[in-house]
Image (cartoon, rainbow, N blue to C red):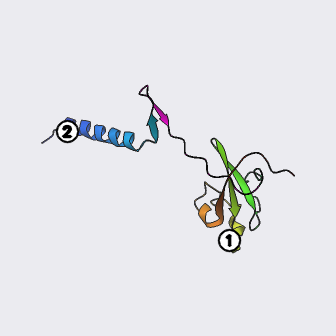
Amino acid sequence: MMNYAARAIYSLFTLASIATYVSPTTANPMGATTPTIPPIPPAWNGEGCPMAFTSGAMYGAGDTVSVAKPGYTLVYACTTSANYVFCGMSGFEPNAGLYADIVWTILGSCMGNISP
């Protein structure tokens, strides 16, 4: 049987091991770790990047918006179903809102701006 202090140390060691295991890092030759960068999604079929998403804006069915991420920008399309009325509402923000998957579809990544 382990005493209280031994259990506490064992618990901390176990938690630290789990945290290290699930941490999204990659070891480099020097022994330090660096964050693992997710791959950039394929480019979308449009030209440049559409306007950035604005919470509270009115979006029509099929409208496209962009959302900047570290290192790349994603393009989303508002649904063409009757649910399109929710595309600009709080909670439905692409890539962040709790209900985003109901009204937004990822089309891919983009670079630059769409010409006016």
Does 39 sit above or below residue 92?
A: above
Q: Residue at x 29, y 41 (%)?
A: 14
Q: Range of the magenta residues?
A: 29-46
User: Of helix, strand and loop, which one carries label 1?
Assistant: helix
Residue 58 pos. (x, y %) = 77, 62
First reached walking from the N terminus: tag 2 or tag 1: 2
Q: Residue at x 74, y 66 (%)?
A: 62
What's under tag 2, amino acid-wise? Tyr
The residue identified by callout 2 is 4
Does 71 sit above or below residue 44?
A: above
Name the dominant secondary structure of the magenta segment.
loop
Does 34 sit above or below residue 57?
A: above
Would you say residue 27 sits in the magenta stretch?
A: no
Q: Check residue 83 in the rendering and tell me which mark sits there, or answer none.
A: 1
Q: Is residue 64 left or right of residue 102?
A: right
Q: Residue at x 79, y 47 (%)?
A: 113
Would you say residue 41 sits in the magenta stretch?
A: yes
What's under tag 1, amino acid-wise? Asn
Q: Quadrant of residue 31?
A: top left
Q: Using the image as rendered, state which of residue 4 and residue 77 is in the foreground.
A: 77
